[in-house]
């Protein structure tokens, strides 16, 4: 069933909305929206400083307890209204489910998925589940592994809404290559490895510059101060401000994450025509093609093993402890190589930037009409 068949849609409200979720509400055009006031009551949120700098990854009670993420249908809705739910299942009535990865349906609790997989499959295969919208091809693949071909065929990939931010990639700065890292959770997004790799790049190519937009742990500040090419900025800016101040003035996005299911900042970099260096974690290979628009590297540790959770997913709360013990020297050398190539080869940089914009237009452009 497609959006055009829906009589009306009610977007399930919750306290924590990301920009991409609000974009879905803002740009929904296929059927009447019953609660457009969400846009005035909510704003896009990011992981706050306290959580980002915590010594361990804080898990919500939903992640700790083995439960299904089932929501009750809001009272007073028209009988034929379809409820749009992010990551959850609706107890009664027609609904659409939007997934970053299927484990959202159990609060990202792996034990709960084992316990309730059959029940979840019944929910997803039912006629009242009007659509299964996957944020990525990786998400759809995980659905197939968990629930079989019937659910896989019912699901469709709906990349987050995004418009091209430039018509042509920005010209490279003749003073040197401009690298960019944007992510509130510095350590689990590979920040330490990035610092070590960039310092070696800077020693060989002192014209290179790295801007970091993050909640920076105190222990890394001395290391940054020792390298004139690194400039740290607090992660207090809106998405639009990050685009205007940093994305439009960068050449290469560095995203060496160990934990992402998607990576919205990578999609934003594509839309800005930036070359990208990132890790092969879950959906990132859909936006980074090694040798075409950047470099796709194997991470030294990850919560994902292709489309299934790795053993580290089960130990997510102690993931930062694993990072402290990690020997990432090989990964840092792998990260250094493409950074140095871009810093020393303007033509290679130009081609990859153009290829990022081409890839965005081919696969991710808002004009393709996911909504």
Image: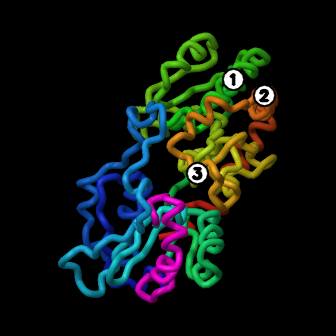
Q: Residue at the far bottom: name it.
A: 127
- Secondary element under disc 1, as helix, strand or loop, is helix
Residue pictured at 40% horizontal, 67% vertical: 69
- Of the residues tagged 1 and 2, which is closer to the observer? 1
Question: Do the CB atoms of the residues marked 1 and 2 lie less than 8 Å apart?
Answer: no
Q: Is residue 315 above or below residue 332?
A: below
Q: Which residue is mark 3?
A: 313
Residue 114, which numbered label? Answer: none
- Of the residues tagged 3 and 1, which is closer to the observer? 3
First along the sequence among labels 1 and 2: 1
Q: Main secondary structure of the magenta part?
A: helix
Report whether 255 appears left or right of 89. Answer: right
Q: Residue at the far top: name it.
A: 226
Q: Which residue is mark 2?
A: 340
- Secondary element under disc 3, as helix, strand or loop, is helix
Label 1: how many residues lie within 10 Å, few (<14), some (14-19) or many (20+)?
some
Q: Measure the alpha-carbon separation of dots 2 and 3.
A: 32 Å
**Residue 344 x, y percent position in the rendering:** 80, 26
Question: Do the CB atoms of the residues marked 3 and 1 lie less than 8 Å apart?
Answer: no
**Residue 86 x, y percent position in the rendering:** 41, 65
Residue pictured at 75% horizontal, 27% vertical: 343
Report whether 301 appears left or right of 329. Answer: left
Q: Which residue is mark 1?
A: 196
Tell me which segment is drawn in magenta. 106-131
First along the sequence among labels 3 and 1: 1
Report whether 114 appears left or right of 239. Answer: right
- Of the residues tagged 2 and 3, which is closer to the observer? 3
Q: Measure the alpha-carbon separation of dots 1 and 2.
A: 13 Å
Q: Measure the alpha-carbon separation of dots 3 and 1.
A: 25 Å
Q: Residue at the far left: name it.
A: 76
């Amino acid at each position: 069933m497609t959006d055009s068949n829906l009589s009306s849609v009610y977007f399930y409200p919750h306290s924590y909305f990301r920009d991409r979720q609000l974009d879905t509400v803002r740009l929904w055009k296929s059927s009447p929206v019953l609660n457009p006031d969400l846009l005035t009551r909510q704003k896009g949120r990011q992981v706050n400083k306290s959580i980002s700098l915590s010594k361990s990854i804080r898990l919500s009670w939903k992640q700790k307890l083995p439960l299904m993420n089932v929501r009750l249908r809001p009272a007073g809705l028209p009988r034929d209204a379809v409820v749009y739910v992010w990551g959850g299942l609706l107890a009664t009535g027609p609904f659409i489910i939007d997934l970053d990865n299927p484990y959202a349906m159990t609060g990202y609790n792996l034990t709960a998925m084992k316990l309730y997989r059959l029940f979840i499959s019944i929910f997803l295969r039912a006629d009242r589940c009007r659509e299964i919208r996957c944020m990525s091809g990786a998400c759809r693949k995980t659905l197939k592994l968990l629930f079989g071909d019937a659910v896989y065929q019912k699901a469709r990939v709906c990349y987050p809404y995004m418009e091209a931010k430039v018509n042509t990639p920005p010209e490279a700065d003749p003073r040197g290559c401009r690298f960019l890292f944007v992510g509130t959770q510095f350590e689990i997004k590979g920040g330490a490895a990035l610092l070590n790799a960039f310092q070696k790049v800077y020693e060989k190519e002192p014209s290179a510059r790295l801007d970091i937009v993050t909640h920076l742990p105190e222990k890394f500040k001395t290391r940054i101060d020792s390298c004139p090419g690194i400039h740290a900025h607090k992660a207090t800016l809106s998405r639009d401000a990050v685009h205007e101040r940093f994305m439009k003035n960068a050449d290469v996005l560095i995203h060496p994450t160990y934990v992402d299911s998607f990576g919205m900042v990578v999609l934003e970099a594509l839309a800005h025509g930036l070359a990208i260096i990132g890790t092969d974690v879950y959906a990132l290979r859909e936006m980074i093609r090694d040798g075409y628009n950047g470099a796709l590297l194997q991470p030294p540790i990850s919560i994902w093993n292709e489309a299934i959770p790795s053993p580290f997913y089960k130990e997510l709360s102690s993931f930062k402890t694993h990072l402290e013990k990690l020997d990432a020297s090989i990964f840092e050398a792998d990260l250094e190589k493409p950074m140095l190539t871009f810093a020393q080869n303007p033509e290679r940089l130009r081609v990859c930037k153009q290829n990022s914009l081409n890839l965005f237009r081919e696969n991710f452009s808002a004009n393709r009409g996911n909504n």
